[in-house]
Amino acid sequence: MVKKAHFVTGKGGVGKSLISAVLARYLSQNSPLDTNRKQEKEKILLAELNEQSFFKDFLGLKRISYKPLPWLEGIDISQWSPQECLREYALYLLKLESLYKLFFENPVSKSLIQVAPGLEELALLGKITSSPRSHGPPMNYDQLVIDSFATGHFISLFRAPAAMAEAVQFGPMGEQSRGIDRWLRDKDFTHLHIVTIAEELPVTETIELYKTLKKEFGLIATVYLNKLTRLTSADLKNLNPELTESLEYIIDNEKEAKKNLKDAQIEYIELPLVNSLEPSELIDHLAQEMKKAEAAID
Amino acid sequence: MINLGDNTKTLICIGTGGVGKTTIAASMGVGFAYQGQKVLVLTIDPSKRLAQALGVKPDGDPHQVRLSENTSGGELWSCVVNHQKTFEFFIREAAHTGSGKSISPENLNKLLQNKLYQQLSGRLSGSQDFTSLITLNRYVTSGEFDLVILDTPPSQHTWNFLRAPEKIAGLFNEGIARWFRDADSKDANIFKKMINLGTSQVLKALESLTGSQFIKELSTFFQAIQKWQKPLEDYIMNCHRLLISPHTEFILVTALDPSRLGEAQKLSREIKMQGYRLTTVIINRVPLWLTIKTASPSARVANLISYYESLENDLQGRLALFKTQLKVYKCYELRQNTEDVSSLQKNFDELVPLN
């Protein structure tokens, strides 16, 4: 039974997918021992919503599918598309394979599903919230980490259930939409993570997104300031002028980003630029950093 | 600087989010304007700095950008795509051309007031792919500019943009429209229609999933858009033609990062296979100081330099895979915190060919 859903978002190019993998690793390494069950650690599912898989190439996986496959100890990985979420849900509701086939292999309903507004968002969020709503096939995970859409698309995803509930007030569709919306607003269930780097545009987007999510959904997101060089002016001694100028620009950007986040009263977790191109090394290093940062906050 | 084909009228900058597509699109605009062309740059969401540099207003109209002299008669115009306005333009344009003329004002209102339409238009304009394509088509066909440059919307995958015409065409699919045709008339309700079409079980399944109110809204929606079908399809077809026209070039913008470069390689192969004219790859935001040798840096600086050196080595290893038939350029990162016309021009002039 899924107790927590972690959504990871942010502007394109800030490292959302990498941080999703890091978060999954961190949660798996630091989840409390579950004494009621025989397993030692919580089970984590890392799910990406990318149409073209990022994790398959990045993590060097043989394959990735809707059906979760094992990645690291205690962590499974999968790629979700709205179509497959809907299909699984329909099969669960309709029970009969033949009826389901008739429904899904019918060209009219195929195109209808594709174009009906809001249906894809509901399918994804319906799957994510299926455990607490006790509606849909059971999911044998304790926590979900969802490598979600970039900022703008992410807001429309979150707004979809309420919009649908308003457009269709009666019937099962309205009922489900309201249920999904309720769980998205549940502080214990929904956890938001916004990733940014120390540059003007991503930081501005992060602040706006943070405020929007707080105002509209009452949720406080965890913000990660990623790829920090942590250079200081002391590092610039004895360098030639051109290099000094470039590095000063980086130092200024990092200062500015921290200042802007503080001014907006947003707490953030600092993650350093890791000098490695090796994904597993990167992930383990950053998971350690995440642990250090969490410990410092507590 | 880079060279385009002699007959190129449209330039489309593609690439994943966060690689600096917008700055590259603006640099191209400035560069080609100084070469004497009348250029329009269409952007989606310019940063404050860039908006100031180009003097753009968010009203969705083209504005001329002030350039210094010596432009050899060239002009630079910029325009921020206004999605809500563009969608309305599209609906009205379709209602005024060809078979669209038969659309009555009542029919227009019926469509505009339908709840699902309201959500749909919000979502389509929100996805931005479709509205930027309409805007592009509008200004290319106007013939007012020698060159129109589009900075594509930030999307996870360029296919979202390229498939926008196909996706919206699916919406006006004859099959669906037929399904709901005259569903309100007394003796032929939607359920009977379904039975007539032999798909009653499908509807039952749909109803158990969604409820009858949803189906009612859908029915109204498809009835209302029925008359738009032909004119919208024509319009969408024109947009698609523009994408595969021999006068259109695609520029792929990517970054100095192994997973970005890997994605770019895949994308460049696929996009060429589909018949789009991808001619150029730009690796953006390469730090200039990579080339600067320095003695005895601090540990942190040494660490940073070694990180970027490993990125550079990775790039060199991948370059051969790009080279066939594609021009590859490196673009150095802007060093100052200001973007203005002269720094954009410098950006354009200093593009370094890698092959």
Image (cartoon, coloured by chain):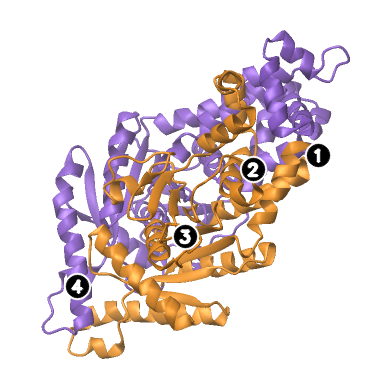
Residue at label 2?
A135
Q: How much space separates mark 4 and mark 3, taking CA atoms?
A: 26 Å
Q: Residue at x 47, y 60 (%)?
A: A11
Q: Residue at x 66, y 49 (%)?
A: A133
Number of other residues with Cα within 10 Å of mark 3, as a class: few under 14, some 14 to 19, many 20 or more? many
Disc number for residue B305: 4
Disc number for residue B297: none
Identify the hue of chain B. purple
Q: Residue at x 23, y 81 (%)?
A: B300
* SS under mark 4: helix
Position in image of residue A80 (x %, y %):
47, 42
Above or below — where is A32 with respect to B22? below
Determine if marks 1 and 3 fall on one subunit.
Answer: yes
Q: Is residue B57 left or right of residue A287?
A: right
Q: In the rendered picture of this protein, how many numbered marks are placed on residues?
A: 4
Residue at label 3?
A11
Residue at label 1?
A170
Label whose residue precedes the other's in the sequence (1 or 3): 3
